[in-house]
Image (cartoon, rainbow, N blue to C red):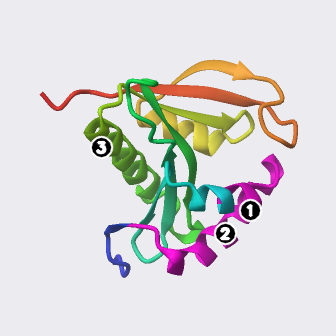
Amino acid sequence: MESQPEFWRKAGRDDYSFILKASKEFQAFGPYTEIIAGWLKDPWVETWVYGEKAGFIMLGPFFPPYFRSYIDVMAIYVSPERRRKGVGSKMLHLAEERARKKGYQFLRAHVGCENLSALRLFQKAGFEIKKKIENYYPSGLSAFELQKKIKTSR
């Protein structure tokens, strides 16, 4: 039985310690605790928390769509006890809804080549590999660039 409520909220200052602690899982890719701390302050980035800290997703930068046609999934995190229970899929659905609402044509993400579980999550959500980028992350690891066409609500 699911004990945590299922809801979204924009991250507030009360969520920052959870987000920064969770971001330590990204350290293999570079200094992501510092990077994410900067994104939390960026007015062009949206951070959403799912449930009672079941996970978070960061989207942006939300520049006007006439400057570019895509929005990035900048970070996505699901708490270990909530993994493989559909939370990541719900987060990517929110990302698509936010992008559609704001008028973007595509979602984009970068996933470490060795992060097979994240790669499967994105592919299951309809993302396609566009290219491999060597030395993408500050740590020197490579990434796949993924993209998904946003379906219009018509």
Question: What's under tag 3, amino acid-wise?
Answer: Glu
Counting residues from the N terminus, which is met first, the one under dot 2 or under dot 1?
A: 2
Callout 3–callout 2 Cβ contact below 8 Å: no
Counting residues from the N terminus, which is met first, the one under dot 3 or under dot 2?
A: 2
Residue neighbourhood size for the residue with mark 2, other residues' Cα within 10 Å, grouped as few (<14), some (14–19), many (≥20): some
Q: Name the residue under label 3.
A: 97
Quadrant in the picture for residue 52: bottom left
Residue at image position (63%, 35%) is 110
- Residue 7: % across, % down: 31, 69
Residue neighbourhood size for the residue with mark 1, other residues' Cα within 10 Å, grouped as few (<14), some (14–19), many (≥20): some
On screen, residue 43 versus residue 33, left or right, reads: left
Helix, strand or loop at label 1? It is helix
- Residue 93: % across, % down: 35, 45
Mark 3 to mark 2: distance in Å?
25 Å
Quadrant in the picture for residue 112: top right
Q: Mark 1 points at which residue?
A: 33
Question: What's under tag 2, amino acid-wise?
Answer: Leu
- Residue 103: % across, % down: 29, 32
Residue 57 lies, with reference to residue 146, above or below; the image says: below
Q: Is 20 inside the magenta-drawn segment?
A: yes
Q: Mark 2 points at which residue?
A: 20
